[in-house]
Each structure stands twice: as C-alpha cells, then as structure tokens.
Amino acid sequence: MIPVNDKVTITRSAGLDGWGDTIPGVVDIIKARVNNSTVLTTDSNGVEVIGKGTIYFNGFVDIGYADNLEFTEANGNVVIEHPLNINFKKDLGGVILITKVVV
C-alpha cells in the first residue's frame, strides 16, 4: 500500500437546506496521502475541470460528491474542497485497495 502520513477531515452532507446549501453531518478524520498538483479530470457531470490535488485513501472510503474534505497543505494552508472525481482501484479479486479522490 501507499504511505498515509496526512489526515483528511471528511464532513459528510446531511442534505440541503432551504437555500440549497449543504447541511453538515457526521465528521470523520481519516489518514490519507495528499498530493498537491494541478490535475485535469472529469467531474460527476462529465465536464473537464482542473483539480488542485489528489487524495489517496487505503481501502474503501465512503465519500460523496456533496461531502467536504479538509486537509492541510505542506505550506500550512488549510484547504476545504468538494470531491471532483472519486475512483476506486481494485485488485484482480475485486477488493478495493485504494480510494482516489481528486479535489
């Protein structure tokens, strides 16, 4: 597996309020690997977008596109973003080894 030296705070969405804003729900802190780099990816609507980085989690992590991901960059800046692309990497037996999230 990959080394997971960073911590990512996942604030799950509990729905939308009357204004269409996300209502914060359950908060989880999970160890991950955060790579800060510009990434060209496709979002959940099929539109090409530019992401700020990639987060790798060991195993399966239940993440939705409405969730907030919070992490600290190497320079100390705290970043809060929604996932742009969520991808699960499986082995030959179908077991999820890595959850890859582009933010």
Image (cartoon, rainbow, N blue to C red):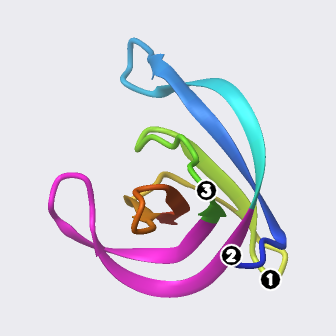
Q: Is residue 103 visible?
A: no
Under tag 3, what secondary structure? loop
Tell me the distance, in whole angstroms, between the alpha carbons under discs 1 and 2: 22 Å
Under tag 2, what secondary structure? loop
Q: Is residue 64 magenta?
A: no
- Assign the magenta stretch its main secondary structure: strand
* Upstream in sequence: badge 3 or badge 1: 3
- Magenta-drawn segment: 32-56
Residue type beneath disc 1: Ala
Q: Position of residue 24 (x, y in %)?
A: 61, 26
Q: Is residue 14 visible?
A: yes
Q: Position of residue 91 (x, y in %)?
A: 45, 68
Tell me the distance, in whole angstroms, between the alpha carbons under discs 3 and 1: 24 Å
Mark 1 = which residue?
74
Residue positioned most to the top: 18
Q: Is residue 51 magenta?
A: yes
Tell me the distance, in whole angstroms, between the alpha carbons under discs 3 and 2: 9 Å
Q: Position of residue 11 (x, y in %)?
A: 65, 37
Q: Residues within 10 Å of mark 3 (few under 14, many from 20)?
A: some
Q: Is residue 12 above or below residue 62?
A: above
In the picture, the disc for residue 59 is 3
